[in-house]
Amino acid sequence: MSNKILANKDPVLENLTTDPEVEAPKEIKLDEVRMGRVARPLRHVKKIPTKAQVFHSDKGPVTFSYENKIRMPVNKNKLVVEVKYVGLNPVDLKIKNGYTKAIYGEAGLGREYSGVITQVGENLSEQWKESDEVFGIYFHPHLAKGCLQTSILVDPSIDPILARPVNVDPKEAAGALYVLGAAFNILDRLDTKGFLKQDSNVLINGGTSSVGMCAIQLLKRYYQLTKKIVVVTTGSSAEALKQFYPDLDGELIFVDYLKCRGKSSKPLRAMINDQKTTVIEESTGNEIEVQYLQGKFDVVLDFIGGYDIVSHSTALIHKNGAYLTTVGDYVADYKHDIYNQWDNPKANARKMFGSMLYSYDYTHFYFDPNAKTASKNDWINKCGEFLKTGVVTCRVDKIYDWKDIEEAFSYLKTQRAQGKIILEVEKF
């Protein structure tokens, strides 16, 4: 068998197996081989890297994340903003308090900011330019996104954004638009419904909250309120308000919240009945009597919460007046409050049937900062104009490096801040 196979040879193929005319390859000597490093070819950058502050649960720590990259090229209807400063708000704590278990992945922090535009979508090139200094609101609580990161992708059709006026410091701008927008929308609502007039008698419960301070300035400087505003706050906060707004010193009557142990209805009723109240004279520290002839209130703005004023509303609020709260029947507690939590059953019934149960209008106000809501009253541009013209100024209480966010949160939880708490974001 093997003999047959060997005998069956093809001479043509046998001749093709070798080529005697081709020289054998030379041996390569090792000392002739050079293995130098070669640079990788340049590749197009398709994503903008970011560094963000995130959390996973209410009890867990706030940590840095590098996962939220911004895809390039930027969408034609969007902007990329390099964030410089971020303003903290109670809603940041309320959203964090709602994450009771670490099963939802990472969630962002920060709802308002100031910064610089670095990328512009082609459809926005006429309105915005790279290097424009801006400030705005970035409110996406249900998407677990925040603006406490080095760069954010902004959709101006949803996210309110304005050019920063030269007279407004970037730190102030970072804490201005959310609270000013809330204050203006509250007053605009009351004005539109006919409750707020130039001669209205107004009570503000929580006058040194950031929204309260914006409301005071708007009432006096924009709505030109003629009567004095009654402000419920602490004694030290009353002195702070006088220092912040010296032009409004004689336009405010203060009721000390701590002296009445949170039951402000008692001194308010006494003030109305006796037609006088007592205030502390700053120079001597003595109590002096001040005449009060304004009677019951036409409008009550409640930024503290609680049922005390509502329970004595007959003695405090005029018939056909208005009571507006941003908190509800439970007194605000930033350590435990949860975003969009249900109020107690009585308050929920009051929201639905308030006009039938009471002789005044009862409103539990929720601020929706979506830019689409501005189609009704142009609140975004109006707030920008208020800041530009000095009608309203944003008071900054403390500034922290964003690495010290836990310390900033601790201060916010005390509920004693007299202005905004600002975080400075590092350049990345």
Image (spheres, helix red, strand yellow):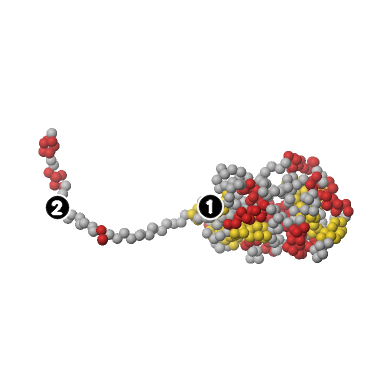
Q: Residues within 10 Å of mark 2 (few under 14, many from 20)?
A: few
In the rendered image, the quadrant that contains the N terminus is top left
Q: Amino acid at mark 1?
A: Ser
Extreme-right residue of the structure: 274
Image location of residue 286, percent across then percent down: 83, 62
Extreme-top residue of the structure: 1
Report if residue 197 is visible in the image. no
User: Number of labelled discs?
Assistant: 2
Q: Amino acid at mark 2?
A: Pro
Which residue sits at x=56%, y=60%? 426
- Quadrant position of residue 5: top left
- Quadrant position of residue 240: bottom right
The residue identified by callout 1 is: 65
Task: State which tag comes first along the sequence, 1 or 2.
Answer: 2
User: Mark 2 falls on what kind of element?
Assistant: loop
Judging depth in this view, the residue of 247 and 426 nearest the camera is 426
- Residue 371 lies left or right of residue 347; in this view the side is left
- Please determine whether, in this image, residue 417 is positioned above or below residue 329: below
Query: Which of the two discs, 1 and 2, sits closer to the camera?
Result: 1
Which residue sits at x=57%, y=47%? 56
Q: Residues within 10 Å of mark 1 (few under 14, many from 20)?
A: some
Which mark is on residue 17? none
- Residue 63 lies left or right of residue 207; in this view the side is left
Mark 1 and mark 2: span between their CA atoms? 67 Å
Judging depth in this view, the residue of 220 and 250 nearest the camera is 250
The residue identified by callout 2 is: 20
Image location of residue 275, percent across then percent down: 88, 55
- Quadrant position of residue 293: bottom right
Image location of residue 98, percent across then percent down: 63, 45
Report if residue 50 is visible in the image. yes
Which residue sits at x=73%, y=56%? 208
Judging depth in this view, the residue of 189 and 394 nearest the camera is 394
